[in-house]
Image (cartoon, grey):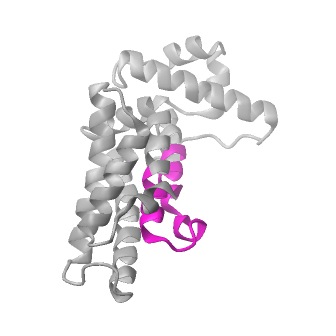
Amino acid sequence: MSDATRRVPRTGRGERTRDELLAAATEVFWDKGYVDARVADIVERAGVAHGTFYTYFDSKEAVLWAIASDLNEAIAGTARGVRAEVGGDEVRAIELANRRYLEVYLANRKVMRLMEEVAAFNPEMRKARQRTRVRFVDQTVRSIERMQAAGVADPDLDATYAAHALVSMVSHFAYAMVASGATLDADAAVATLTTLWARGLGLEVGRRNLDG
């Protein structure tokens, strides 16, 4: 990933200005498309001078990488520690991870759609998105193997293929809903994805699992 973000003092005012530039860039990229967006458009939207922009970033590409980096970290953390939070209940852990993923994705729908679109023609963005996916798949493989060893998941499943399929189901579902502009009932979506995921692994799913 490109690292053209300038190193500036982490003051409260500096952080606010950086956040304002990132927010402005997100809106400009969304309105104009990444290719047609200009630094001039970003500073105009943010209400700052060109010089202020270049205090923080070298280019519009650097802004895009900053946006992507922040969001990729947020996305990657959605499944972290969920099993411990629900006392080891496997189905509720899947539910919590799915809920957090969808919440982050939907709250950042413009950026997520932008990242996917830029990845179609930008090899570096494509690699960055792939790295995030690999982290999810690896986490899921370990989870499936743990459940198989405990005797609660189907032992005949190939853990790697199952992990790729399940991660693809959730990520492509989220992208398709955002790209189509469809109205999403988050609770129904989480319940459905969780049921499909859990039953796909051979876990027992009941109302108690999903309602807590």
Secondary structure character of the magenta stretch overall: helix
Q: Residue at x 50, y 30 (%)?
A: 59
Q: Nearer the viewer, residue 41 or 19?
A: 19
Q: Is residue 117 visible to us here?
A: no
Q: Residue at x 37, y 69 (%)?
A: 140
The quarter of the displayed image where residue 195 is located: bottom left
Give coordinates of residue 78: x percent, y percent.
51, 55
From the viewer's perspective, is 149 left or right of 65?
A: left
Q: Nearer the viewer, residue 163 or 34?
A: 163
Residue 115 % position (x, y): 37, 38
Is residue 94 rendered magenta in the image? yes
Number of numbered discs visible in the structure rendering: 0
Relative to 8, 114 lies left or right: left
Q: Is residue 85 magenta?
A: yes
Q: Which residues are drawn in magenta?
A: 70-98
Which residue is located at x 34 percent, y 81 percent?
152
Q: Nearer the viewer, residue 32 or 50?
A: 32
Residue 133 quadrant: bottom left
For residue 1, above or below residue 143: above
In the image, residue 22 lies at what x, y percent? 57, 29
Which residue: 40% across, 21% down? 30
- How far across and down, in percent of the image, does residue 178 sit? 34, 32
Q: Is residue 194 positioned above or below 57 on the image?
A: below
Of 65 and 179, the residue lying toward us: 179
User: In the shown orientation, is residue 117 left or right of residue 131?
Assistant: left
Q: Is residue 92 visible?
A: yes
Residue furthest out toward the front:
207
Q: Is residue 52 above or below residue 208?
A: above
